[in-house]
Image (cartoon, helix red, strand yellow):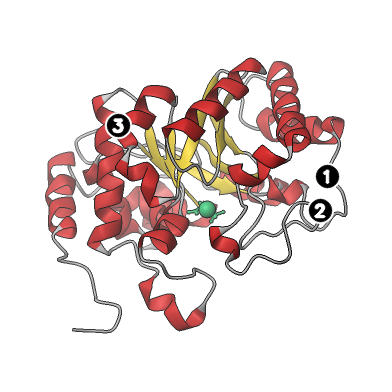
Amino acid sequence: HAAKTKELRGKPGSLKDGTHIPLLANVSDSTDTDTALEYGAEGVGLFRSEFLFIGNTEPPTVAEQTAAYAELLSRFPGKKVVIRMLDAGADKPMPFLTPEDEPNPALGLRGLRTLRVHKDIIEGQLKALAAADAQTDADLWVMAPMVADEHEASYFVKLGKSFGLKKVGVMAEVPSIAMVADKVAKVADFVSIGTNDLTQYTLAADRTLGSVANYQTVWHPAVLRAIAMIADAGNANGMPVGVCGEAAADPDLAVVLAGLGVNSLSMTPVALDDVRAELANWTLEEARQKASEALDGAFYKPAWGD
Ligand code: PEP
Ligand code: MG
């Protein structure tokens, strides 16, 4: 099995009928980047920039950030690299940014919300990204985490463009953004669905809490419907929609996501072989059929059993 899946390395992600589903990697550091290249990633779908900030008592300088982004981009000439803005708060607290007294940090100041109250951080990061982009020739896409609606999307897209960035988009992690996805599609260059948080918020179950871990499944039809709403809005408006949460790393879910109309999948690099191999077994029509069964609950095991 392993040998068979490895055979397809170096080939683009593709359904049986030739539909291209680019397979990208989630990375945080240069070790992950090495693994991504080894496993034939077609680019990076999620660079978690927290790595540059975590464990420090103050934020990295613009020069330090520029060097780090340029180093990443230089490994993917001509390829898509999606860099996520700092996602501070909730499960990724930053001592210099995240309030310590929030009763529900996942519902508090995190992601873009944190960046909006720390203008120096958001501007420094955008400046570094634009500088790194100018020094390299990867295809840089920049996105903000924890965006709630089209107003926040518009704020971020305008700000990113004012710094000279070309492709600026948002993550879909909060259920509200799925409900207004048609509006978001009019302002954002792309959407990347973060299924880890989207599941946590759709089912109101803390993703870090073992006692409610049984809720953390993308197979729940409510989560799949949210994904379908975003994919439909994207496809109706010519806006690319990717998935960069853990769901993309599950070969069976990857087929369903493709069937729901998701255009690209980004995952932990070691999952690339198995996802690539499974997608090759399905035509788009078959994947759509499986997606419609999934939307109907066919593959969902209720959190507490039947
Ligand atoms: C997600 O929420 O699905 C995601 C990709 O981001 P993170 O896991 O870093 O919150
Ligand atoms: Mg997230």
- Near mark 1 (Cα within 10 A), the count class, few <14, some 14-19 or many ≥20, is some
Q: Earlier in the sequence, mark 2 or mark 3?
A: 2
Among the 4 quarters of the image, the one containing residue 219: bottom left
**Quarter of the image that includes the C terminus:** bottom left
- Near mark 3 (Cα within 10 A), the count class, few <14, some 14-19 or many ≥20, is some
Q: Earlier in the sequence, mark 3 or mark 1?
A: 1
Residue type at mark 3?
Asp
What's the mark number on residue 59? 1
Disc 3 element: helix
For the residues labelled 2 and 3, the Cα–Cα distance comes to: 36 Å
Cβ at disc 3 under 8 Å from ligand 1: no
Q: Inspect this view and state whether residue 34 appears.
A: yes
Circles 3 and 1, Cβ within 8 Å, touching? The answer is no
Q: Looking at the picture, how far across and down is residue 135, in whole percent?
A: 74, 18
Circles 2 and 3, Cβ within 8 Å, touching? The answer is no
**Residue drawn 60% across and 45% down?**
113
Circles 1 and 2, Cβ within 8 Å, touching? The answer is yes
